Image: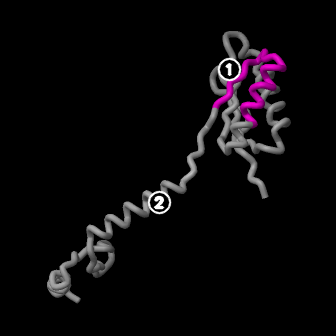
Amino acid sequence: MGPPEARRLAQERSLDLVEVAPTARPPVCRIMDYGKYLYQQRKKAQEARKHQKVIQVKEVKFRPKIDQHDYEFKKKHILRFLKDENRVKATVIFRGREITHSELGEEILNQLRGELTEVADVERRPRLEGHTMTMILVPRKQP
């Protein structure tokens, strides 16, 4: 139907004529209560946000000369973060001349990866960026 006829029909029903698909040829319009439509859209968006799970990235920092007890303590934190379904960014920070022994940092991250194979997958392998070496772990999906 033509635009004037559609406007007249919408006014008779006390509703709005809303353009639904402006790029279509001819443009598509719908007769509806626009205020009610906007209200329903807001409610749908609010309901979708309510059921949404926010995934955080937790960071745990190591040093190249870390003691075994400190390593185990930080590993427990990583296990807790993974159990809560958060991603974990394991970082080894080098200071000064420690950067010449970057293989120590890679050993730490590879040891961590080996010990957490049952609960975590590696999203990003150990990578040296400036004076930090990082690896990202994600919780493993349970079948």
Assign a secondary structure to mark 1: strand
Q: Is residue 98 left or right of residue 117?
A: left
Residue 47 % position (x, y): 47, 60
Q: Position of residue 94 (x, y in %)?
A: 69, 17
Q: Position of residue 14 (x, y in %)?
A: 18, 79
| Magenta span includes 75 | yes
Q: Nearer the viewer, residue 24 or 109?
A: 109
Give the amino acid at mark 1: Ile
Q: Earlier in the sequence, mark 1 or mark 2?
A: 2
Instruction: Quadrant for residue 28, please give it.
Output: bottom left
Q: CA distance from mark 1 to mark 2?
A: 42 Å
Q: Is the residue 57 above or below the residue 98 in the image?
A: below
Residue type indicated by callout 2: Glu
> Which numbered disc covers residue 12?
none
Residue that badge 2 annotates = 47
Placement of 102 over or under 58, stated as above or below: above
What kind of element bears circle 2? helix
The residue at which mark 1 appears reads as: 93
Residue drawn at the location 50% of the way across and 55% of the way down: 50
Q: Is residue 45 left or right of residue 67?
A: left
At horizontal 63% and vertical 22% (from top left) the residue drawn is 130
Q: What residue span does the magenta drawing correspond to?
A: 59-79
Q: What residue lies at 40% left-to-right and 62% top-to-bottom?
A: 43
Eyeballing the image, is 117 above or below 12?
Answer: above
Q: At 72% across and 31% down in the image, what residue appears?
A: 77
